[in-house]
Structures are given as structure tokens and as C-alpha cells.
Amino acid sequence: MAVILGFALLFASISLATSPNSTTPTSTVSGSTQTSSNGAFVTSMELSVEDLWDMYVGPVSTFSINTTVEATLVPSSSLIPPPTLYYPPFPTGQQIALQSKNESWKFPKDFWYGVASAAYQVEGAVKDEGRGPSIWDVLTHRVTNFVAHNDTGDIADNHYYMYKQDIARIAAMGIKAYSFSISWSRILPFGSGEVNEEALKHYDDLIDTCLQYNVIPMVTLYHWDMPLFLQNTYGGWLSDRIIDDFTEYARIVFTRWSSKVSHWFTLNEPIVFCNFYPLPANTFKATSIPPKQQPFVCGHNALLAHASAYHVGKSLNSSLTISFKNNGGYKIPLTDSAADREATQRAYDFNEGWFANPLFLTGDYPTSMQPFLSTFLPPFTAAQKAALNGSADIFAHDAYTSSFYSAPTDGGIPACTANASHPLYPACYNTTSVYATGWNIGPAADPAAAWLNWATDWVPAFLRHVQATWKPRGGIAVSEFGFAEPFEALKSRPEDVAFDPVRAAYYRAYLEGVLMAVGEGVRVVGCLAWSIFDNLEWSSGYTVKFGVQYVNLTTQERFYKASFFEYVNMFNTYQET
């Protein structure tokens, strides 16, 4: 595997280790040393994947288990529900208040439910079997305090080698679907070019293991782990060159697994990963795009990349269900004023509508976004609008919570939209989790997940809003939802960690909200709990716990939490057979 690239010498103190006799994939370009337009010296050099690691990441941690672990039988003792869900035979005398089943509620027979993960958050084995670095390897290793406690994904949950046991564990609980992402830089270590066959064989077996256990594999092509080489070559999502590279990556993956995987997500939460831009200064390739414009340039290219990948997948197998994963939640005016109602609509436009309107409604951005975007983005062509419109088979939404919205207090929305230097420009709304009365919308999650409150009362209204607004032809999927149990990281005894009553009650209440919406005629086709187990929660590191399973990061031992039993019990109780 070889490519040649002219690299700016961004890190003068980093020397390039060459390995002329190495069999590691390399990247090469021809050319002579010269001075770039910004005065930086650039040179042509042959780069191997190992060189990329050495130059931009440095040493990484490894775990003692570095070959695939075969699944073992999940002991029946691990499958005993917590006391709130069953009566233990001894001791006797325990009394639990009866919670009667609502006979008017039901999940359809074909409703799928599962658990979710993402490659960088769980796989570990970051340098193994030819994987190239992603931007997150750099962010965790080279940007001090970008991640809490400077945690990394080097080992994470070692899911790369323990996936067989992990799939056996969720199958033993009765889970129907497993949603995971593929590491782009495993398949294509430089983001494009020669394919890493070892990576394909790994995911071959992961998918086959799901099928072996009657678990539906659901695949996300991109969950934030941009190949480093593409970020350093042309700025990643800030360049329209990403469209062709992502399309080719999608073609490789769809071609390999479209006969085995029926459900696909192209992009996970572009609202979030586009708002990572601008990335930390002096870390990746510099750009002249103004910081406030960068998220929207990213979004423009992400939309076109999604549409292109969608049509590639459909051309290979028209029966595939392909979408992308939006994110956000129900948006509530803080007061009944016209200004707050307008602010709430702007919040929808600059969040869900940013990506949903082009794909489900018009092939173009919401009207409120266009005055800002038209100053620097090219308009979508007629052909692009046609490709965008209809390029999502279901409305997949990562919906954890809900919030209140209000107009800016200093002159309202008109003053904000007229002032490009306003701190709320261009969206021009305020948001809070606190009612006008001073009460929280619901209990707070762990303090390290300050964005999250328990707001399950608003789930039916949100699902009704999605169906009424975007009218997805294939229905709605809650593609992520979950709760960070407060202060779970402070617990040391396994039995204390396993009993997560707030998360368990959240899942029960949330799914009751879904049942209400289904009973009111909203077409909800499935849901995925975040997450399969505790993992690297991006910049929050390992301190924040969302898992329905605990992982001892020293020994890699797993065990179920009470919330997992509560989650599954809702389907045992309410799903049609």
C-alpha cells in the first residue's frame, strides 16, 4: 500500500523514522522540497502507517489479550434479574408493590431493539492488524486535557479481540440487534488507496458472529474517527474531496457486506462531529475557513457524502435500509411568547432540520439557515438536491433528552441575526434545561454529562413531532438513548455498580413514552440502548458511565447491570409475539 504526499513540517521537533525494509503499508508522492504559500517548508516523503503513528501519535498502550477470544457459555447465575424484577426463593417475606401491565400498550412484532457501540470507544487494539491512526488517536495523545484524565482509546474495552464473548453476552440477554461502527482507518489505513484485508476479515467474523447468535448486525460507516491522513492532507470534512473518498470507502464496505447486513447508518450525528470544527490549533492541517463557517462547510460535505454513499448502497442491494443518525431532542419554548416559539423553531432548523430537511423534505436547507449559508456555501445544484431528497429510509435519531429554548435577551432574534459578532449568531437562540419556574426539566445525570437530564415525559411529543414534520417513509428509530448514572465512577464494589436504579428507571420510563407514541399511531420501528458497556465517552473519558454492562478496565471482566434487565424486561412484557 503506497502513496506519496507533500507534508508541511508542522512539528519541527518530530523526526521521521524510516523503515525501508518494512512491510507496513506506505504512502508516497513525488516532488521536490519547496516553500508553501504560508511560508512553511514542505517535502515529499514515503510514509508508512508506522510513520504516521510515530510522527503524530507516539507510543500507545496494549493489552495482554491480543488474539481473538472464543465465546464461552454465559453462566445462568449471571442472568438472574435484580430483586425488583423477580421474587428470589429465599429469604421469604419480601413485598413489592404490584405494577400492573398496561394492556393497551404493545411493541409491534417486528420492532427491533438492541444495544450500540462505536469503534474508537470500544475496540482498542488501535495499531493492530494494519489500522491507521484517526484524528482521535491524535486528540487523545497529543492534545493535553482534551479528554478527561488524558484517557485514550488504546485499549478501551478490547472489543476488537473480545467481540465473540460480547455478542454471546448480549444474545444471552435476548437482545435482537447490535449496532456497531466500522473503523474507516482499519479498512483504509490512509483513508483511501489500498484496502487492509486483515480488517475486512475481522469485520467478516464480527458480522458472522452476530448472525450465528441471531443478533441483527447494524453497521455505521462513520462514528467520528476521521482517518488522520485525510485530515492532514486536505482538512477532512472541510474539503469536498472527502465526498469521493467516503463514497469509495462506502462502496468497499457495502460490496463486502450488503448481502449480510440489512441496516446501515452512513454518518453518526454530523451535528456533533461538524461542531468539533475548528479542531485544536497547531494539531492538524491548517485551514483558511473562518471558525464560525467550518461546522457548516463540514455539514455541506457530509450531506453530499451521505447521499452519494446511500445511492451506492442502494445500487448494490435495493432492499437495504440506509439512513444517517440525527441527534437532538424535543424542543420546548421556555415561555409562550412569539419570540420564544420562533427561537424554538430556529433550534430545530439549526439542529435536526440542518440534515433532515435536505433528506426528507426539500433537498435543501431550512429557510432560516439560508441567509447565513448563502454567504459562503455554494447552493446545491438541481442534481444534488435530487440526490439528497429521499436518501434516508428511516428517521434514525439519537434522542437522549429535551430542552427549553428562548430568544436572545439583548434585542431578540432580529438583533442577533443582524450582528455576525453576536455570540449566539447564526442560530440566535438560548437553551436551558430549567423551566421558567426554576425547576429542572428532570433529574440531572452525572455531573460530567452536564448536557443530559432525565426528560422522558417529552418522548411521545418528540416522536409525534418527528413524524408530523419529516414524514419518514420507513418510520422512526431511536438509534441511541441512555443515561449516565450519577457518580457511578465513585463506586468501588461490583454489587454497587451493578445496581444502577436511575438508569434502569430511565429506560423503563423512556420506553413507556415510546409505547404511548406507538399507541397514538406514531410509527416507531426500533431502538438501540447506548451503550453495550461502559466505554471511552469521548472528551469525558472513562469517568462517565453509560453502559448497561460494567467493564473492569484492568482485567476486562464484564458483568450485567440492573438497567440491562430492566431494558429487556420492557420488551418481554410488551412486545407482540
Image (cartoon, grey):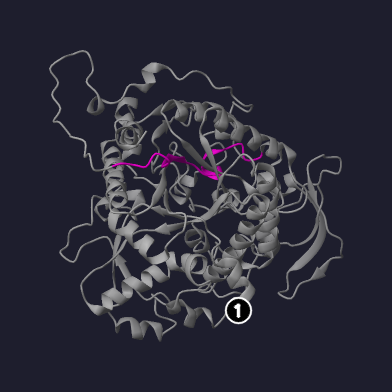
Q: Is residue 237 visible?
A: yes
Q: Give the range drawn in magenta.
A: 106-127
In depth, the one of 439 and 47 nearer the eye is 439
420 falls in the magenta region: no
Q: Where is residue 563 in the image (x, y as percent from the top left)?
A: 32, 35
Q: How many numbered dots are placed on residues in this image? A: 1
Question: In the rendered view, does 566 fall on the left or right side of 420?
Answer: left
Q: Where is residue 303 in the image (x, y as percent from the top left)?
A: 57, 65
Question: In the rendered view, does 411 fall on the left or right side of 90?
Answer: right
Instruction: Tell me which amino acid carries mark 1.
Output: Pro
118 falls in the magenta region: yes
Res 385 quadrant in image: bottom right
What residue is shown at x 13% (from left), y 30% (from top)?
A: 97
* Outermost residue, top side: 90
Residue 327 vertical placement versus 103 (above, below): below
What residue is shown at x 40% (from left), y 32% (from top)?
A: 550
Identify the secondary structure beneath mark 1. loop
Q: Position of residue 399 (x, y in %)?
A: 38, 53
Residue 520 vertical placement versus 83 (above, below): below
In depth, the one of 97 and 301 nearer the eye is 97
Residue 354 vertical placement versus 369 (above, below): above
**Residue hosting label 1:** 378
In depth, the one of 108 and 446 nearer the eye is 108
Q: Can residue 11 be seen in this view?
A: no
Callout 1 environment at 10 Å: few (<14), some (14 to 19), or many (20+)? few
Res 229 quadrant in image: bottom right
Q: Position of residue 357 (x, y in %)?
A: 47, 69
Q: Quadrant of the C terminus?
A: top left
In depth, the one of 567 and 523 nearer the eye is 523
What residue is shown at x 78% (from left), y 65% (from top)?
A: 42
